[in-house]
Image: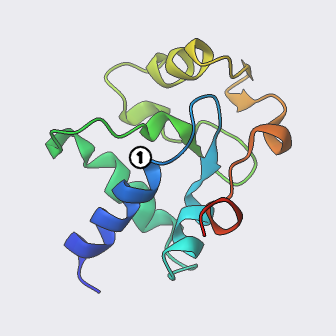
Amino acid sequence: MNNENFFQKVYDITRQIPYGRITTYGAIAKYIGSPQSSRMVGWALNSISFSEDFIPAHRVVNRIGLLTGKHHFRYETLMQELLESEGVKVKDDRIVNFEKLFWDPSKELI
């Protein structure tokens, strides 16, 4: 699979993350059939500035709920602000109630 197709699949899944929910780089990678490609999912999301459509990359965190991608936003607190505007609580750069808010595309999308 070339990067363009991989990136497009990442964008398609990320657009489906429900408002007020979060998922992980790994969950997206697993869903698109490339479970060892979590970092590549991050690279895809880091390049969304080239996309004309809204892609809610702020809803994607690492496997333990940390906002590891925050430094790729326009300013460092924007990711947290976007999540909090959706009712997602963040403390010390980590999602509160991570398990409750976790959206698993492998279970939610059929």
92 lies above or below 63: above
Give the side of residue 94 with respect to residue 10, left or right. Answer: right
**Looking at the picture, how far across and down is residue 39, in whole percent?**
47, 64
Q: Residue at x 45, y 18 (%)?
A: 78
Give the side of residue 57 with respect to residue 87, left or right. Answer: left
**Looking at the picture, how far across and down is residue 52, in whole percent?**
15, 39
Q: Residue at x 26, y 45 (%)?
A: 48
92 lies above or below 24: above
Q: Residue at x 35, y 40 (%)?
A: 55
Label 1 belongs to which residue? 15
61 lies above or below 42: above
**Looking at the picture, how far across and down is residue 77, in whole percent?**
49, 16
Residue sticking out furthest to the front: 110
Query: In which quadrant is the N terminus drawn?
Result: bottom left
Q: Quadrant for residue 93, please give it.
A: top right
Q: Amino acid at mark 1?
A: Arg
